[in-house]
Amino acid sequence: MSAPLKLYAAAAPNGFKITTFLELLGLKYDLQILDISKGEQKEPWFLKLNPNGRIPTLIDSTHGVTVSQSGAVLQYLADTYDPNHKLSFKYGSKEYYKQLEYLIFSVAEQGPITGQLYHFKHLAPCKDEYAIDRYFKDVNRIVGVFDEILNRNKHNGLYLVGDHLSAVDASVYGWSRFLKPNDIELEKYPLFNQWYNSVDQNEFVQKGVNRLLQK
Amino acid sequence: MSAPLKLYAAAAPNGFKITTFLELLGLKYDLQILDISKGEQKEPWFLKLNPNGRIPTLIDSTHGVTVSQSGAVLQYLADTYDPNHKLSFKYGSKEYYKQLEYLIFSVAEQGPITGQLYHFKHLAPCKDEYAIDRYFKDVNRIVGVFDEILNRNKHNGLYLVGDHLSAVDASVYGWSRFLKPNDIELEKYPLFNQWYNSVDQNEFVQKGVNRLLQK
């Protein structure tokens, strides 16, 4: 029998965000892995679901909702499937908006800028030193901001907001897996480095990652 | 007497988003314009408010909330100051998540990618044809996606979601002001062009823009 949740994703930063959060929430879901290298995410059937033609997209047949963009998918899951706020914060609370602020920082800066660095370091046809330097510096700045955010919240533990993991940790984790391949030295950011290792070693996070890696 | 809402912003895309939405909501607010050219947003007093050191930041002394990142500020204002959903959608509804999806598309793709195009066309010290071409194509793709989103919603009118303006229109408008200076031909995207002109001519939107331009 198919699950009421169906996720379209790929073994990429924005895919890992969602599978890890689904596993943390303990939800069952069907997974369809798109072949991005063949442009499957730009095919007409998928564009009907998401006009932006990018993963992830989640269909929740219980509520008749289709939602795309990793930040929106995470917030939808938190709002809908975490009524006791074990992995989220009460709607309207100060922590809810702090979580939303950092979630948006993650999708609006960490993701796009790390993505540009990855492109210019690994995919661009020519070596563009100006662009590599521009994005390398900005990714370091962004990781430094997360280190400071963790510092401000350290009385609560190794979490970005409050005293437990939430959608924002899943979001930041997704792209953080791609820092070492971009030669970012995590040791320069001690709290962030501790936080990353702690999230990375979480058994549910590993389960989410492995589902996309088909391990 | 000072207003309970204080906005720190600048005459820049992410500033325009917030002042236009505040005016659409009919809210009174104090405005402090930061001199970004002098790096005022990186000064210690501002970093205490926003560790990311970027505008906009909103302080709501009524609710004891400080919130940054344009997408989060817009969602906070909609949730808090639009109880009758004239410029928003009911929390948990399908339209609420559609609005959140496109809001995040705006802050995660439209903003960062148009920003990179602007940098390489106008600010970079050398002419980098590869980067200019990369971002020019992607901004055109993104505007095309908004044109398609408007097409899917055209039975409701010229709005990105539902039958009225909302935070997502304010968000997309902020960066859309910077399309023509980047040589994007809006005429290629008929519905988007109509939508842009309609929003741009709205008297409250103009009031918000002019407040930041100190006109």
Image: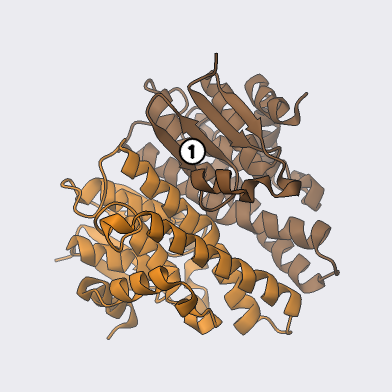
Chain colours: A orange, B brown
Residue B63, quarter of the rendered image? top left
The answer to whether residue A9 of the structure is visible from this angle is no
Residue B45, quarter of the rendered image? top right
The single residue placed furthest to the top in the displayed view is B1
The answer to whether residue B36 of the structure is visible from this angle is yes
SS at badge 1: helix
Tell me where residue A100 appears, x and y as whole percent. 40, 47
The residue at the point 81 percent across, 59 percent down is B123
Determine the chain carrying the residue at label 1. B
Left or right side of B72 for B8 = right
Left or right side of A15 for A164 = left
Give the position of the C terminus of chain A as an image quadrant: bottom left
Tell me where residue B175 appears, x and y as whole percent. 66, 45
The single residue placed furthest to the front in the displayed view is B44
Q: Is residue B42 above or below residue A125?
A: above
Q: How many marks?
A: 1
Three-letter code, disc 1? Val
Give the position of the N terminus of chain A as an image quadrant: bottom left
Tell me where residue B181 appears, x and y as whole percent. 81, 47
Residue A171, quarter of the rendered image? bottom left
Q: Of residues B148 and B79, which is closer to you in this image?
A: B79
Q: Is residue A6 above or below residue A135?
A: above
The residue at the point 80 percent across, 64 percent down is B124
- The residue singled out by tag 1 in the image is B73
Q: Of residues B107 and B69, which is closer to you in this image?
A: B69
Q: Is residue A188 above or below residue B211?
A: below
The residue at the point 74 percent across, 79 percent down is A128
Q: Of residues A178 and B147, which is closer to you in this image?
A: A178
Tell me where residue B90 appears, x and y as whole percent. 34, 31
Dot 1 crowding, Cα within 10 Å, few <14, some 14–19, many 20+: many
